Amino acid sequence: MKLSARNVFSGTVSGITKGAVNAEVTLTLTGGTPVVAVVTNASVDSLGLAVGTEACAIIKASSVIIGTDLHDARVSARNIMCGTVAKVVEGPVSTEVDVEIGGGNTISAVITHGSARNLGIKAGGHACALFKASSVILGVS
């Protein structure tokens, strides 16, 4: 299957916490980076998710927020992945930013050109990628 989403990560389910309607699923990527997803309990059941199950986390690049200087920042996004900016592709309106987050994983974000300029985003610099747990789509083979 081919996907239009830029960010597809493989990992192992390392935790599931079920609520009345939704479940919080933690997927541990190669290199140990955790990704937290919130999906329905029905999705957990239909995908056959359990601790130890191999799964994929899919996140659209437009759902990823880029930040710098987040040392003491408090944000509601459950997923914060910091690393080195590997690539910046500037356009007149949007800029694509790729951040190496370790374990051979790179996360892509599409932000406005103005935001990239204001943040001083440059290849080799430090940046963090943030996204909500509800922005993660889970899949299994």
Image: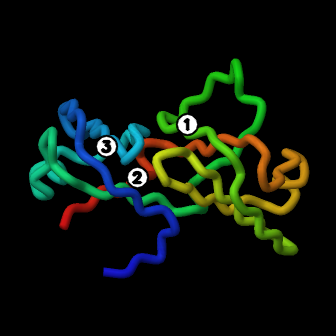
| Sooner in the amino-acid sequence: mark 2 or mark 3 | 3
Labels 2, 3: front one: 3
Report if the CB atoms under discs 3 and 1 are less than 8 Å apart. Answer: no
Q: Which residue is mark 2?
A: 136
Q: Position of residue 97 (x, y in %)?
A: 70, 59
Labels 2, 1: front one: 1
Give the residue drawn at x 70%, y 18%: 72
> Which of the labelled discs sits on residue 80, or is there none?
1
Q: Which residue is mark 3?
A: 27
Q: Quadrant of residue 98?
A: bottom right
Answer left or right for 125 relative to 51: right
| Sooner in the amino-acid sequence: mark 3 or mark 1 | 3
- The crowding category of the residue bearing disc 3, from other C-alpha atoms within 10 Å (few below 14, some 14 to 19, many at least 20), is many
Q: CA distance from mark 3 to mark 1?
A: 14 Å
73 w.r.t. 86: above or below: above
| Sooner in the amino-acid sequence: mark 2 or mark 1 | 1
Q: Secondary structure at mark 3?
A: strand
Amino acid bearing label 2:
Val
